[in-house]
Image: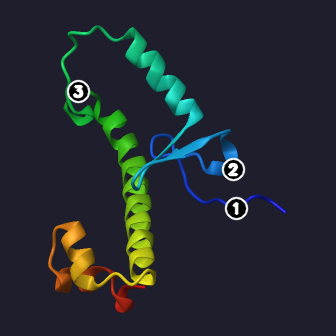
Amino acid sequence: MAAAVIARCSFCAKPNTEVDTLVGGPGVFICDGCVQLCVSVIDGKPSDAPLIAPWEHDLPLEQVLQNLGPVAAATTQVQQNLAAWVGKARELGGTWAQIGDALGMTRQSAWERFGPATA
């Protein structure tokens, strides 16, 4: 029986079944391969390099369009993880007011976004 896909790397989208290690953070994951890539980028980066958002780089349209699908997939994964965490909070007795406070929204907004009608 094949291992179940539990999560995907938020950077390369590989599932946990295709990587050696997948490290989880609050709603995001990174695989060992992407960690190695990050280390090599950080090691080779000049210390005075400016920090700019990826979409602010001078990129051709084709590359920007290629990034839209992976960004949308990462967004979907984050939304699914958030819903799972809200579900866990509810299982543990968390109220909609507490969940709303944790998310910076009203209890009504939290219920409308994550309540039974959305499940």
Nearer mark to the viewer, of 1 and 3: 1
Answer whether labels 2 and 1 touch (C-beta < 8 Å): yes
Reply above or below: 97 against 68.
Answer: below
Q: Which amino acid type is marked by label 2?
A: Thr
Give the label on residue 4, or none: 1
Residue assigned mark 3: 57
Question: Real-space Cα distance between discs 3 and 2?
Answer: 33 Å
Front-lying residue, 29 or 62? 29
Q: Residue at x 19, y 27 (%)?
A: 52
Q: Which residue is drawn at 40% across and 41% down?
A: 66
Front-lying residue, 70 or 46? 46
SS for callout 2: helix
Q: Does residue 12 appear left or right of residue 109 in this picture?
A: right
Q: Which amino acid type is marked by label 1?
A: Ala
* x, y percent for residue 81: 43, 64
Q: Which amino acid type is marked by label 3?
A: His
Q: Does residue 43 appear left or right of residue 46 in this picture?
A: right
Looking at the rendered image, the quarter that the N terminus falls into is bottom right
Q: Dot 3, how many residues are within 10 Å of its Cα: few (below 14), some (14-19), or many (20+)? A: few
Residue assigned mark 2: 17
Q: In which quarter of the image is residue 46?
A: top left
SS for callout 1: loop
Q: Does residue 18 appear left or right of residue 111 in this picture?
A: right
